[in-house]
Image: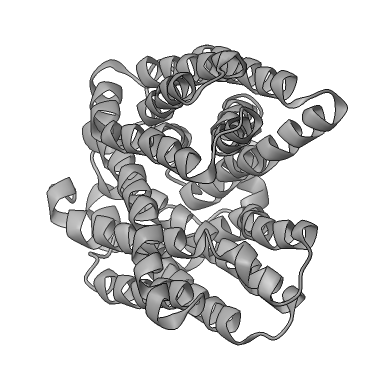
């Protein structure tokens, strides 16, 4: 029997496209609202346009699993890069706000296919003893790309205006597509690993069979997604609340992101050697604690300290949701299961800021941040309760 595909063998063709895609996403992130405003949108409508990407991603999770199961991981990633290219071209050409919203929603749909196919590919191709490191590195590379993207976009926008950011994403997607063409196909790995082919199952049957996992560990993933997404909102909002200027806020946010990026490989190593709980639970405890401490800050120095703690907590959990999804996924219906599991996590990511907004509207920003901190601790309890002692082996 042939050995499974090694991490180093597939690393360039998996992680380089992830880096390129992350750069593209990071490049357009700061300008979507500005593009909507240029087309005449109010501030509220511009916010909805930005949210369209998250909505598209949530709506695309289940179909992405079905599509990946039918056409394979590599083809699904190629299709996603094609879809995002068309969507970005539309962003450059559409004359109306709602046309832009549809195009941004399509980028979210493409992101769901892209993300699920990459996760499914690594879940199957990489040996179990390397799985957490492989998926944590995937998440870390994506974060590095998202960190670099705004700077590259800002440079190109000096020459092309706001459209330059979309061109960065478009070119990055095209380059990612070229690299993906060299990605080894998984079918030979599957044939070597299994004596009999796995029978294709319907998405509904896969979800029904694994509903106990989805309504326990999936709910934990939802809570994790909510508190992680809250982090990106509460730092700038609290900075404005205590009177910091936008430049200082950006520096604090960037420092938090830098700490976050440094921890992805150590986090994966700990998960592979000691188990998933050793990363998932501390990550949520630290992130929840940082939220609880945030309303106590009243200066740039103290806010920076708490923001760094948030980066530490988030970085500790790099790749943990993808790893848990891979661990729980069955060999038959892996992609469909991952689509359902990602739906929980992405719903949390989309719903976290809405929960923060709702509590803020009902009370104030400080109590809302405290609620998100308690959500982080609830996520820690859920992870401690429902993460299985041993992951499912690759079959």
Which quadrant of the figure has residue 269? top left
Residue 101 coordinates in the image, percent (x, y): 70, 69
Horizontal side of 359 relative to 284 (left or right) equals right
Q: In this rendering, would 153 be left or right of 95?
A: left
In the rendered image, the quadrant that contains the C terminus is: top left
Extreme residue toward the right, this view: 362
Q: Position of residue 98 (x, y in %)?
A: 76, 74
Residue at x-position 46% and y-position 34%: 321
| Residue 181 x %, y % | 27, 74
Q: Quadrant of residue 37?
A: bottom right
What residue lies at 68% left-to-right and 70% top-to-bottom? Answer: 36
Residue found 19% across the figure and 54% down from its top: 11
Q: Nearer the viewer, residue 187 or 266?
A: 266
Residue 340: x %, y % from top left: 60, 45
Give 288 or 345, whichever is nearer the viewer: 288
In-image side of 208 versus 288 (left or right):
right
Nearest the eye: 219 or 328:
219
Question: Total marks drawn?
Answer: 0
Residue at 54%, 57% in the rendered image: 112
Task: Name above or below for residue 232 compared with residue 80.
Answer: above
| Vertical arrangement, residue 127 with respect to residue 85, above or below | above
């Amino acid at each position: 029997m042939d050995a499974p595909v090694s991490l180093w063998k597939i690393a360039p063709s998996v992680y380089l496209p992830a880096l390129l895609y992350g750069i593209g996403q990071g490049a357009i992130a700061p300008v979507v609202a500005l593009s909507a405003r240029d087309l005449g949108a109010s501030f509220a409508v511009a916010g909805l346009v930005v949210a369209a990407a998250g909505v598209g991603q949530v709506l695309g999770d289940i179909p992405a699993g079905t599509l990946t199961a039918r056409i394979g991981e590599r083809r699904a990633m190629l299709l996603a890069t094609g879809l995002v290219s068309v969507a970005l071209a539309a962003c450059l050409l559409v004359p109306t706000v709602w046309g832009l919203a549809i195009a941004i929603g399509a980028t979210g749909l493409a992101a769901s296919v892209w993300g699920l196919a990459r996760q499914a590919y690594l879940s199957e191709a990489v040996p179990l003893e390397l799985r957490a490191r492989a998926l944590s590195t995937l998440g870390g590379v994506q974060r590095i790309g998202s960190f670099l993207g705004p700077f590259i976009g800002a440079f190109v926008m000096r020459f092309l205006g706001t459209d330059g950011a979309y061109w960065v994403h478009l070119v990055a997607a095209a380059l990612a597509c070229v690299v993906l063409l060299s990605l080894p196909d998984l079918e030979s790995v599957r044939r070597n690993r299994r004596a009999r082919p796995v029978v294709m199952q319907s998405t509904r049957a896969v979800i029904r069979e694994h509903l106990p996992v989805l309504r326990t560990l999936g709910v934990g993933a939802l809570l994790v997604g909510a508190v992680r997404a809250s982090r990106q909102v509460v730092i700038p909002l609290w900075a404005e609340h205590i009177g910091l200027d936008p430049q200082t806020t950006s520096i604090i946010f960037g420092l938090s992101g830098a700490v976050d990026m440094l921890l992805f490989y150590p986090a994966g190593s700990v998960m592979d050697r000691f188990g998933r709980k050793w990363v998932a639970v501390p990550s949520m405890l630290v992130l929840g604690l940082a939220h609880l401490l945030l309303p106590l800050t009243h200066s740039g120095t103290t806010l920076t300290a708490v923001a760094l703690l948030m980066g530490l907590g988030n970085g500790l959990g790099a790749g943990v949701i993808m790893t848990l999804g891979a661990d729980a996924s069955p060999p038959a219906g892996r992609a469909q299961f991952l689509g359902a599991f990602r739906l929980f996590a992405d719903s949390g990511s989309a719903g976290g800021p809405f929960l923060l907004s709702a509590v803020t509207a009902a009370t104030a920003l400080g109590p809302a941040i405290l609620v998100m901190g308690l959500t982080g601790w609830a996520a820690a309890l859920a992870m401690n309760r429902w993460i299985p002692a041993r992951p499912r082996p690759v079959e």
